[in-house]
Image: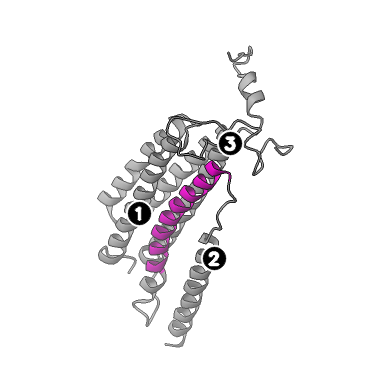
Amino acid sequence: MARIEPDGADRDSRTRDPSFAGQRTRMAWARTALAFGAVGGIILKTSVIPGLVVLATVPLVYVLGVLARPDADTAHSAGRLRLITCTIVGVALVALGVSVFAPGHR
Amino acid sequence: MTAGGEPEAGDQSASGAQSSAGDMPGETEPDARFTLANQRTFLAWSRTALALVAAGLGIVQLLPPFPGVPWGRHMIGLPLIVLGAGTAAEAYREWTRTQVALRRGEPLPRSWLPLLLAATITIVAAAAAAVALVSATR
């Protein structure tokens, strides 16, 4: 059972994982969610609805990565990563559509 | 394992590789740190893919047009967006291949993503230089 210190830190889990792999992975998921937000912001500047759709993926990606169990095994990870891949391909298709059809800088 | 706590390749038998019900014969679930490191690599490539999409979109939508070259922005930006989608798909394929190699204790597969990325960015940069030159001479 994990030993919780007075400051709230879980010392035992640090001892089990001195490289903080789980924490670094959660931060990587958070950065990925922010990257979706950046793309959504650029799309929003020229096309409101597609931009809002892409921005809506930000909390989903965050929940998918940061709040999900960080030490998930291969089968659990595969589904999440496939979903992220499909989302990025979808965002790229939206970006292509916006690039071709939306009026840009004149 | 390294001094920083990172597991090394081939270290999985000593650091917690375990069998699970869904394992194929000859495969074991690798150490969680290997799985997480592989996942972080996938996420880093995903962010690269999103950055390529953002760059392509920014070039097409936010840059002013090149004088005398009306198709210049699309010629530079659209390949970057397509490369972003391709990078995401290839990153997932590489994650799968790496995870299988980890589960079997085999050498990690070679990654083609850096070569693909470097080659495409070089070609797009050359195209951008050509567009800028043509625009400047008109």
Task: Determine if residue B47 is in view.
Answer: no
In the rendered view, tell whether residue B106 sits above or below residue A10.
below
Identify the secondary structure beneath mark 1: helix
Residue lying at 32% horizontally and 52% vertically, measured from the top left: A90
Q: Kindly identify which chain the residue marked by label 3 belongs to.
A: B
Mark 3, residues whose alpha carbon is within 10 Å: few (<14), some, or many (≥20)? many
Identify the secondary structure beneath mark 3: helix
Identify the secondary structure beneath mark 2: helix
Q: Which mark is residue B33?
A: 3
Q: How far is the residue under mark 1 from the one under mark 3?
A: 28 Å
User: Mark 1 — residue?
Assistant: A89
Q: How far is the residue under mark 1 from the one under mark 2?
A: 20 Å
Q: How far is the residue under mark 2 from the one under mark 3?
A: 27 Å
Q: Inspect the image, locate mark 2, and give the three-letter code of the amino acid beneath it.
A: Leu
Residue A51 x %, y %: 31, 50
Query: Is residue B95 found inside the magenta-colored segment of the image?
Result: yes
Residue A70 x %, y %: 49, 31
Main secondary structure along the magenta-highlighted residues:
helix
In the rendered view, tell whether residue B24 sits above or below residue A69.
below
Q: Nearer the viewer, mark 1 or mark 3?
A: 3
Q: Which residues, given as a range, are shown in magenta?
A: B77-105
Q: Nearer the viewer, residue A10 or B41?
A: B41
Q: Nearer the viewer, residue B30 or B69?
A: B30
User: Mark 2 — residue?
Assistant: B115
Earlier residue among tags 2 and 3: 3
Residue A106 x %, y %: 32, 69
Q: Which mark is residue B76?
A: none
Q: Give the side of residue A24 with respect to residue A85, left or right.
A: right
Q: Kindly identify which chain the residue marked by label 2 belongs to.
A: B
Determine whether label 1 and label 2 are within 8 Å by CB.
Answer: no
- In the rendered image, the quadrant that contains the C terminus of chain B is bottom left
**Marks 2 & 3 on one chain:** yes
